[in-house]
Image: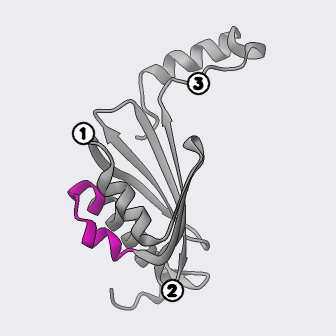
């Protein structure tokens, strides 16, 4: 990607981090598993706390994505936000009722430690202690009109 000295945060280049995470999810969307593998460190680990799953190694991450039942909907990378640790992405799985955010740490110029948070939009309800408050009711009504991914 050329040299961009002004884009460095910590020890990696923001442009590279953004390109890596965007490239990974765009490759997933294209079902291009060879391309997706080029963005992942050989020792990549991906945690998915919502379902208590952990994938150890690039091959396991790619196999999980490749074997995931279709149809997925269309994965659209909405935002990628880099920091000194690595990039975070907001991905919109359109046509589905899910919201998704991913956080990655880099090692040796590749994505190595990932956490993906998938949630079903509207599936969780506020605790009883605040469920009937006017503010909560207004917030849930407003939230029903958006996925929060804009």
- Residue 90, given in percent of the width and then of the height, sits at 44, 50
Residue at the disc numbered 1: 71
User: Which image quarter holds the N terminus?
Assistant: bottom left
Circle 2 — which element? Answer: loop
Which coloring applies here?
one colour
Residue found at x 36% / y 71%: 19
Residue at the disc numbered 3: 124
Depth order, front residue of 43/93: 43
Q: CA distance from mark 2 to mark 3?
A: 38 Å
Q: CA distance from mark 1 to mark 2?
A: 34 Å
Give yes or no for residue 32 being in the magenta stretch. Answer: yes
Residue at the disc numbered 2: 108
Depth check, mark 1 against mark 2: the one in front is: 1
Circle 3 — which element? Answer: loop
Circle 1 — which element? Answer: loop
Q: Which residues are magenta?
A: 27-39
Which badge, 3 or 1, is on the more N-terminal residue?
1
Return the residue found at the far right.
129
The numbered dot on residue 105 is none
- Indicate the quadrant where residue 94 lies: top left
**Direction from residue 35 to residue 78 in the image, left or right:** right
């Amino acid at each position: 990607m050329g040299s961009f000295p002004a884009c460095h945060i910590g020890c990696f280049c923001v442009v590279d981090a953004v390109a890596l995470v965007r490239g990974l999810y765009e490759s997933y969307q294209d079902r291009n598993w060879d391309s997706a593998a080029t963005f992942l460190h050989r020792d990549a680990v991906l945690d998915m706390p919502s379902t208590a799953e952990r994938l150890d190694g690039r091959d396991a991450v790619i196999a999980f994505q490749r074997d995931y039942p279709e149809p997925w909907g269309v994965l659209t990378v909405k935002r990628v936000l880099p920091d000194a640790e690595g990039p975070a992405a907001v991905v919109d799985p359109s046509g589905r009722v899910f919201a998704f955010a991913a956080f990655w740490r880099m090692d040796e110029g590749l994505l190595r430690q990932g956490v993906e948070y998938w949630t079903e939009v509207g599936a969780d309800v506020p605790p009883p202690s605040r469920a009937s408050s006017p503010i909560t009711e207004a917030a849930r009504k407003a939230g029903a009109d958006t996925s929060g991914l804009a």
